[in-house]
Amino acid sequence: MGRSKIACALALLLLFATPLFAATPRAGLYVNRLDPSDAQARDFARPGWGGGLDISWPLDGTQGMLSAIGGIEVSSLLSKVKVFQDQLTGLRVEQHTDQFYGRLFVGGELGPHGNGFLEPYANAAIALVFYGINTNVVVPDDYNRENSINQLLSEQNEAAFGWSAGTGVHLNFGRWGIDGGLRFLKQYGVPQQLGDGAVTIQPAYIQSRLGVTLAIPH
């Protein structure tokens, strides 16, 4: 085999062995389910639903494998009722807790942003968490619920620091795609969840998400 044929074969081998990276930024719109992941949080919140918008932008010089991410999302945790009963009198009191959870986050993501169909990734981010808790105390009337005694115990809305780490997979159809994954969310400095005079807990959540993405021309 001549030198020209060997050079041609090596060139073809190098061409097919080297992946092509388009480094395509993408924007995603998704729905999420938020599940309390610790026992104390589950006592005062049920899983909730929400949605969000995020952007993943590949960094120059990383061949589309490393990108900056950012986004915003909001979720509403479904109302949770906890019953307390006096052992002497038998008086029953219900505590109704409604919670709102929002995040503004930035971070980094490791995973391909190219021409492949299956694009797995892992990411981590820090977040500004907007947390609202509304707690009502109800002394129920078993004969007529309209005669129950209702009292607002507390209503708090605060900002807190948080972080997240997650993994997922992006199915790339070219100009659009489908994205799904899981994230662990943790935050610190949130309002009290257990009522007046109780200890403050720092709940954590598992977020499952599914959405669609669009390629961003650049």
Image (cartoon, rainbow, N blue to C red):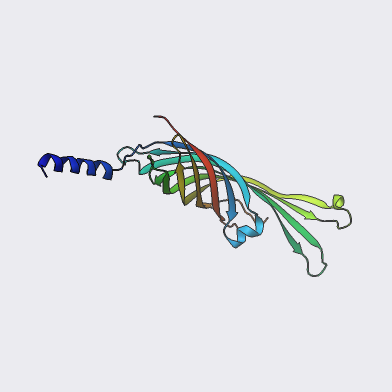
Q: Percent x, y for residue 63? A: 32, 41
Q: Residue at the top extreme?
A: 218
Question: Which quarter shows the N terminus?
Answer: top left
Q: Residue at the front extreme?
A: 1
| Towards the viewer: 153 or 19 | 19
- Residue at (25, 41) in percent of width and height: 15
Q: Is residue 201 above or below residue 123?
A: below
Q: Percent x, y for residue 45? A: 65, 54
| Towards the viewer: 29 or 37 | 29
| Towards the viewer: 101 or 23 | 23
Asked whether the viewer can see residue 42, the reply is yes
Q: Is residue 143 above or below residue 8?
A: below
Q: Residue at the left extreme?
A: 2
- Residue at (42, 46) in percent of width and height: 118
Question: Which quarter shows the C terminus?
Answer: top left
Q: Percent x, y for residue 153? A: 72, 51
Q: Residue at the bottom extreme?
A: 88
Is residue 39 shown left or right of residue 172?
Answer: right
Asked whether the viewer can see residue 198, the reply is no
Is residue 78 shown left or right of residue 187?
Answer: right
- Residue at (23, 41) in percent of width and height: 12
Q: Percent x, y for residue 95? A: 73, 56
